[in-house]
Image (cartoon, rainbow, N blue to C red):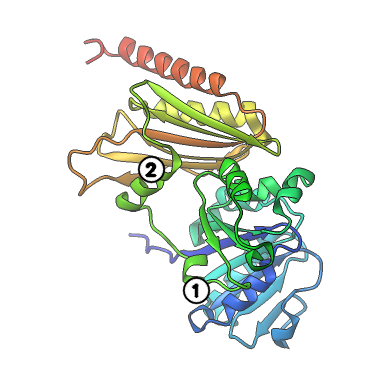
Amino acid sequence: MTARVEQIPLFVLTGFLGSGKTTLLARTLRHPGFARTAVIINEMGEIGLDHELVQTSSESLIELETGCLCCAVRGDLAVTLCDLLNRRDSGSVMPFERIVIETSGIADPAPILQLLMTDEGLRRRLNLAGVTTTVDATTALATLEREPQAPRQIAVADRLVITKTDLAGGLGEPLTRALRRISPSADLLIASHGDLDPNRLFVVAPWEPARVASALAAWLPEPASAVAEATSADHAGVTSLSLRLAEPLHAATLTLLVEALAEHCGEDLLRLKGIVRLVEVPDRLAVIHGVQHVFHPVELLDLDGRPGENPQSRLVLIGRRLDRGWIEALIQAIEAEVSEAGANSDPGGAR
C-alpha cells in the first residue's frame, strides 16, 4: 500500500502595484505561528523584505530573522518549487509548514494557478489553499478602469484584503459593489493600518458540507421556481455570471461542459468555480474549479450528516465576453445528448 504523501498548503498572494502585499506579508511573518513559512517572490526585482534579512544561504534562498525562508524566482517557478521541496525533504532547510507565492504587482496570477493544477508532481505535494488579492482602497476604482491586470487579479481571488481604508475614510459602497461584481464569492477582509490576523489571511479550510452550503448561499440568492436562473454584472470589462441548476447533471455532461468552456472561452474565462450534483452519485457533490483553459481534476464532496437536503448545482463564471444564453443552452444541449445516449444504450430504456 502506498504511503500517503504529506501535502503542504500553498497560498498565492497577488494585488496591483502599491496595494500593500509586501507590508501585509512582512507583518504576517512576524507572528510566531507563521515562523515555518517559505515565501517565493515571483519577480526579478528586489525582495521587499530586506529589513528582515539576516543570512543569505545562496543566491536565491534567504533566511529571515523570523525563522521563515524567502527565495526569488530566477527562472522557472516549477523548478524553484521542486528545489524548495527537495531541500525540505533532505533536511537542508527547516521543515516549513506552508508556502506563500507573492506575485509581481503587474502579473497575471493565472499561469501560476495553471501550473499548480497541471503539474502532477507538484499537485501530489502541494495543496493550493487559496488566492489572496490586496486592494488599495484609495486607488482601486481608478486602477480597475485603467489597468487590465487589476480585475484579473481580483477575479481569481478567494479572499480580498482591502488596504489603506484609514486613508480612504473607510470602505466605500462604490468599491464594495465593484469588487462584488468582479468576484462575488470571495471573502472580503479589511487590513487595519496594514495589519490583519494571519489566521484569517492564510487559512486552510477543507471542503466541509456546512462551509460549502454557506459559501453557496453567498454566491447566489434563492431563485424563483425555474430550471435555471442566472445573474450577471459587468465592470472593467469583466463579467461575473452565476448559475443555479435545479436538476442534477450526468458526469459525462460535466466533463463535456468543462471541455467546451475551455475550448471556446479560453483566456477569456478568468475563473470558474462550481459545485454540481451528479445523477450517478446523488449523495455527493462534484467540486470543480478552473482558470482560463486549465481545470483542476474534479473532487467529490460527501454529503453525509445532512439528511433531507437536496442541494442544487451552482456555477460561478468570471471573465470577459461571457454569454449567459449560450452557456445555458450549452448545458441543456449537452445534458439532453448525454441522456439520450444513455437511454439508447440501455435495453430497458431510461429508468
Across and down, in percent, residue 204 comes to 44, 63
Q: Quadrant location of residue 336?
A: top left
**Distance of label 2 from label 1 (alpha carbons):** 32 Å
| 234 over 94 or under it: above or below | above
Across and down, in percent, residue 195 comes to 58, 74
- The N terminus is located in which quarter? bottom left
Whether residue 4 sits left or right of residue 329 in the image: it is left
The answer, for residue 334, to whether it is visible in the render is yes
Residue at the far left in the pictured view? 307
| Residue 217: mark in rendering | 2
Contact between labelled residues 1 and 2, with CB atoms less than 8 Å apart: no
Q: Residues within 10 Å of mark 1 (few under 14, many from 20)?
A: some
- Numbered label tally: 2
To which residue does mark 1 refer? 97
SS for callout 2 = helix
**What residue sits 38% from the left and 13% below the top?**
341
**What residue sits 60% from the left and 80% below the top?**
68
